[in-house]
Structure formats: C-alpha cells, structure tokens
Image (cartoon, grey):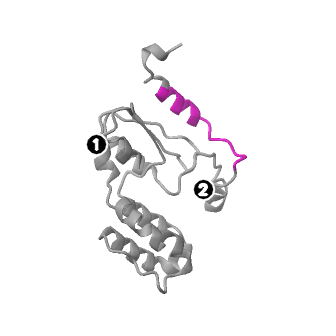
Amino acid sequence: MALTAAGGAKDVCGLVLVAAPGRPLGEALRQQLRSNTANAPFLDQALSAIDSLEAGQPVDITGMHPALMQLFAPPLQKFMISLLSYDPGKMLSQYEKPVLILPGQRDIQVSEEDAQRLEKANGRAKLVIIPGANHVLKSVGSNDRSANIATYSNPALPLAAGVVEAIAGFVQARRPVSLRP
C-alpha cells in the first residue's frame, strides 16, 4: 500500500518498508498457509479462493471452513482482488526516492527472501535486517511459532533493539538542511 500511495506523491521524500512482502500477495499468502500444518483441513479451499480472487472473481463462501471467513469475507473481496494485483518488487523497481527495507529476522509472515527481492528490485534501497525480530518488530528468542504470535498483541513488549535507530537514522539522513539543529 505504501508503494501505491507514494508512487506519484510529490511531497513524499522516501519510504520505510517494514515487514513488506517482496512478491505478489497471493504468493505470500499461499506460502503462509502452507507453512502452518494446522491449515491442512482447509488448505485446498483457501488456495482455490486465492486463485479466484487473483483472477478477479469473487469467492462464494457458502460451505467455506469457518477459519477462512475473516480472510475471504464478501465485504473484503473487492479490496483483496485489488491487493492481489500488485507486484511490490515491480513497483519498487520504478520508485526513485530513498527506501529503507526493514524486515525482522524471525518474521513468520514475510521472509528475509522477500526483503532481498525488494533490495534487488531497487539497488538504491537500504536493507537493515533486525536480528531476532518478528513481523511486528518485537524480539522473539526462539523459532516457536506460538511464542512469536503471542508477541503480536502484547503492548507491554517494546520494539526489538535496532528498529528505532534504523528508522531514525534513515529519516534524519533525509531531513532538509534548514531543519537540522
């Protein structure tokens, strides 16, 4: 979404892409769904729904597994069809302003490979991988999926070390000379 919004905006001086996919969302969703064995009972339904939405076709949710209802709810389908049509790597390759790509090393939703794809798409982009950070940039001490996800909704947990510094350094390096102290 940030790439779409910033694409033609004259007053945007750069982008910070946090935990951003480097491939079309359909590819990312398929990988996420396949990587969790708990999705096995409804994986075929989910993959079929993604295929339909990518083709611009709404999905009939009659008989769909209840776990999929939030992802494929009818009010979201037009948005999903639009979202699935974008290729972040292609969009970033055409972006000419500064970019910071900020993935977490332990992100279970968007991989380091996604970040590397974005960096490859735009050779001027700066990639800073945050060690031990997950998708919401909080520290995770293991590869335990449940522990990782548990951090998402815990507001008491701070951002992982290095997040604020990376973003602040990127922003400060781009401040106009007249605004510097």
Q: Quadrant of residue 23?
A: bottom left
Out of 28 and 144, give the one closest to the viewer: 28
Q: Residue at x 52, y 81 (%)?
A: 65
Out of 63 and 112, give the one closest to the viewer: 63
Secondary structure under badge 1? helix
Indicate whether residue 170 is drawn in magenta: yes
Residue holding disc 2:
143
Which residue type carries mark 2?
Asn
Q: Residue at x 51, y 26 (%)?
A: 169
Q: Position of residue 43 (x, y in %)?
A: 47, 77
Which residue type carries mark 1?
Ser
Out of 99 and 73, give the one closest to the viewer: 73
For this view, does 105 lie left or right of residue 145?
left
For this view, does 53 lie left or right of residue 146?
left
Residues shaded magenta: 155-171
Residue holding disc 1:
93
Q: Position of residue 60 (x, y in %)?
A: 41, 81
Q: Position of residue 144 (x, y in %)?
A: 63, 59
Q: Position of residue 159 (x, y in %)?
A: 63, 41
Q: Earlier in the sequence, mark 2 or mark 1?
A: 1
Indicate whether residue 14 is drawn in magenta: no
Secondary structure under badge 2? loop
Mark 2 is surrounded, within 10 Å at the Cα level, by few (under 14), some (14 to 19) or many (20 or more) other residues, namely few
